[in-house]
Image: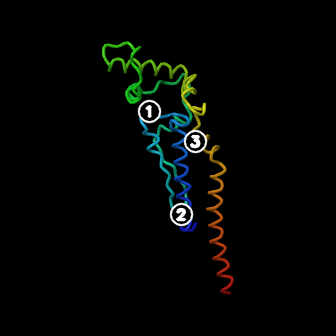
């Protein structure tokens, strides 16, 4: 594919990354504790010589945010949950414990038990989402932007077709 289309593919990859980040954000599905996932979402165009590929990069745990987690599995790591509780600044007023650290750990254990029992997303958690959705942010994004994304792809492909046709016509005229 011609490098002339690199700019169009860069625009598509950046657009996808921005829209995935928007879907995860507080203004849509609200999967924000630290902002680490949103800040990690990045789109890049990779030149493979005769083709261009769009790659989207994000934190590995995106799959749990996107797909959720089934009930009755081994619980998530307790220290990761404790860090999440601390980062999220959840209220500890009703949590038993001698001090703040003990309360954080107790709450993390309660959350772990709930995840084991109910999975993720937790029942009723959709009330924290502006869209009513708590899973499938990738699929929801692609559905939401389908029209514009298709138009961007068509423009990029038409540009490539036009470049190749011009090269063919140049060769025919030279004969």
Q: Residues within 10 Å of mark 1 (few under 14, many from 20)?
A: some
* Disc number lying in front (3 or 1): 1
Task: Locate residue 44, reporting x and y percent.
Answer: 49, 55
Per the image, the residue denoted by label 1 is 33
Tell me if label 3 and label 1 are in contact, CB under 8 Å.
no
Q: Secondary structure at mark 3?
A: helix
Task: Locate residue 169, reporting x and y percent.
Answer: 68, 79
Q: Is residue 71 left or right of residue 165?
A: left
Tell me if label 2 and label 3 are in contact, CB under 8 Å.
no
Above or below, 99 relative to 86 = above
Earlier in the chain: of badge 2 and badge 3, it is 2
Q: Between 2 and 13, which is closer to the camera in this rendering?
A: 13
Q: Secondary structure at mark 2?
A: helix
Task: Locate residue 91, reporting x and y percent.
Answer: 41, 21
Earlier in the chain: of badge 2 and badge 1, it is 2
Per the image, the residue denoted by label 3 is 138
Q: Residues within 10 Å of mark 3 (few under 14, many from 20)?
A: many
Above or below, 85 relative to 58 = above
Task: Locate residue 152, reporting x and y percent.
Answer: 62, 57
Point out the image quarter for the N terminus: bottom right
Mark 2 → mark 3, Cα distance in angstroms: 24 Å
Q: Residues within 10 Å of mark 2 (few under 14, many from 20)?
A: some
Above or below, 147 relative to 76 = below
Tell me if label 2 and label 1 are in contact, CB under 8 Å.
no
Q: Secondary structure at mark 1?
A: loop
Please, which residue is most extreme toward the left here? 99
Question: What residue appears at the point 56 percent right and 63 percent down from the top-left corner?
Answer: 51
Per the image, the residue denoted by label 2 is 6
Q: Between 85 and 50, which is closer to the camera in this rendering?
A: 85
């Amino acid at each position: 594919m011609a490098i002339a289309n690199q700019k169009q593919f860069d625009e598509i990859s950046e657009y996808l990354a921005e829209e995935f980040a928007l879907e995860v954000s507080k203004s849509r599905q609200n999967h924000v504790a630290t902002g680490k996932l949103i800040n990690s979402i990045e789109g890049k165009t990779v030149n493979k010589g005769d083709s261009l590929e769009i790659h989207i990069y994000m934190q590995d745990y995106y799959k749990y945010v996107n797909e959720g987690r089934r009930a009755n599995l081994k619980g998530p790591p307790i220290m990761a949950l404790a860090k999440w509780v601390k980062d999220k600044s959840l209220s500890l007023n009703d949590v038993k414990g001698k001090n703040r650290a003990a309360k954080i750990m107790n709450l993390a254990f309660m959350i772990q038990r709930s995840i084991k029992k109910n999975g993720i997303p937790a029942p009723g958690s959709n009330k924290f989402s502006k869209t009513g959705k708590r899973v499938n942010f990738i699929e929801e994004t692609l559905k939401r932007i389908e029209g514009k994304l298709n138009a961007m792809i068509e423009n990029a492909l038409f540009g490539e077709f036009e470049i190749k046709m011009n090269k063919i016509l140049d060769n025919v005229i030279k004969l």
